[in-house]
Amino acid sequence: MTSPETMAVNLDGHDDSAGPVRGTQSLLRIGMIWLAANLVVTTLLTGTLFTPAVSFGTASAMIVVGTLIGVLVLVLVGNMGTRTGLPTMALTRGSFGIRGSVLPAAANLIILMGWSWVQAMLAGVTVNYLVFEATGFSNPMLFSALCQAIVVVLAIFGHTGISRVEPWLALAILVVMGFVFAAAFGAFSPGEFASIPVDAELGGTPFITLDMVIATAISWTVLSADMNRHAKSSRAGIIGSGVGYTLSTSIAMFLGLVAFSTVLLRGHEATPFDPSVIVAEFGWPLGIAIFLSVMATNTMVVFGMVTSVVNAQSRWHLRFMPTAIVLGIISVVGSTFLGLLNQFTDFLFIISAFFVPVFAIMIADYYLLKRSGYSRQILHERPESRYWYRGGVNWIAVIVWVIGAALSYTLAYVLPSPIGANIPAFAISFVLYLGLMYGIGRGGALGLIDPRDKQPTGHLLDGADETAALRLEN
């Protein structure tokens, strides 16, 4: 792919959209892409939020446990992309309906835009610190906007190049991370890190920490099928993304935890989720690594945001270039609202509240109700489609989504759950969707297709010949 016109394919194999594609990437390639994707400043700085709210040992354990729990959801949704060739938001048509999928797609746009802003702000703050140290000039809003403008240009014209060099950037970033680990543990022993006193006034608990780690995985799952549909097999996609994401998240979060704890042990002023704090401690190589990681990862986020909008509905016939320009302008303007960085924890919980029930519904629908297969009817807006439900919307999915999101919010903010919000919200959404679909949906009630109907299990491009039969059928 060398131009915006060839970056994506239409639902029926034409230009300017993001329909099914045939994956060709190996297990190693997928693993390297996922390894690179999450060696990013947002994941690193999430690790700065844990201590001293909880102990160093507790934070380390929750990083591992939360990552392993979250990656299960990520690989299951990613495998749907590998098996069908569709990106994540296009797959929501199977459970939410051809038109109902606009709802999670709209939420996804908001979330990706927020991620893009946060990453641009962090890059801008980092660049501003380096420039200020060298020249005395400071304007973080300006540098944030400039960083985001570079990202938008790369997303439009250089997405393919970034995807090719990103794994090599990851290796360079790993080298810098190794330097930080060596410096931190060279200055302080593991026992000294473990002895950092817990500040009870911060209100931290192991499950709050666990929820934040799980929420990070959920935030990446919105793009998991987009990335894994390029895997040449389910094995390559599942193992590659599972190992790559687990390693990158664990390393990046633990680095943030160690770097921030080092600042605390030195008795310096320590503000969590501020890149300049750890850059001041470990020097300009870390600052450059942060900048490069944001440029690479944020380019993929902006590109995914554009293709998600282009692909939301086939009847809109949106084109890549004008959509990218409009969203790009919005993203550049929004990147100057630096106050968002102070609400990053709330932002993570909002993501999980929105999308934990969505992914529970998607997994239940694809793997159990539709028996691991969607037909090519999912590509077209026709009332005869088995994905049309009632007026193009599966209202059961929408209702369960609202209930699950409300439950997640309640368990996080109103009546804090002793086991966190994400796990119970996922379980209840999963069971409730299955129960209602098997109950109300049985036999086509309320316009729903019988969930027992036999579904095809192959890649959607394998069923290209089905189009002619579908037209005859209609």
Image (spheres, rainbow, N blue to C red):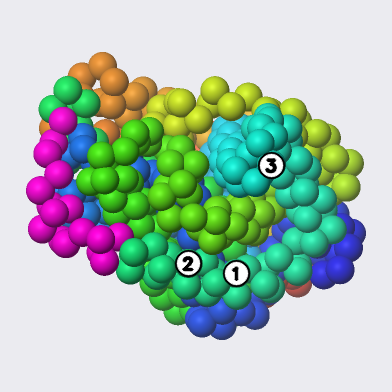
Image spot of residue 462 (x, y percent) = 67, 74
**Does the magenta segment cover residue 190?**
yes
**In this picture, is 282 found above or below 210?**
below
Q: CA distance from mark 3 to mark 1?
A: 27 Å
Let me know if residue 135 appears in the view.
Answer: yes
**In this picture, is 230 found above or below 391?**
below
Q: Give the structural element (helix, strand or loop) at label 3.
A: helix
Q: Residues within 10 Å of mark 1 (few under 14, many from 20)?
A: some
Relative to 51, 443 lies left or right = right
Residue assigned mark 1: 169
Decide which of 96, 234 is in the foreground and name it: 234
Identify which residue is drawn at 15% across, 61% down: 190
Q: Give the structural element (helix, strand or loop) at label 1.
A: helix
Decide which of 37, 413 is in the foreground and name it: 37
Residue 176: numbered disc:
2
**Amino acid under label 1?**
Leu
Whether tag 3 and tag 1 are in contact, CB under 8 A, the answer is: no
Decide which of 60, 317 is in the foreground and name it: 60
Closer to us: mark 3 or mark 1?
3
Let me know if residue 80 appears in the view.
Answer: no
Q: Quadrant of the N terminus?
A: bottom right
**Amino acid under label 2?**
Val
Closer to us: mark 1 or mark 2?
2
Q: Report the span colored magenta.
A: 184-199
Residue assigned mark 3: 135
Q: Which residue reaches farthest front?
A: 135
Identify which residue is drawn at 85% across, 40% down: 325
Sooner in the amino-acid sequence: mark 3 or mark 2? 3
Whether tag 1 and tag 2 are in contact, CB under 8 A, the answer is: no
Q: Give the structural element (helix, strand or loop) at label 2.
A: helix
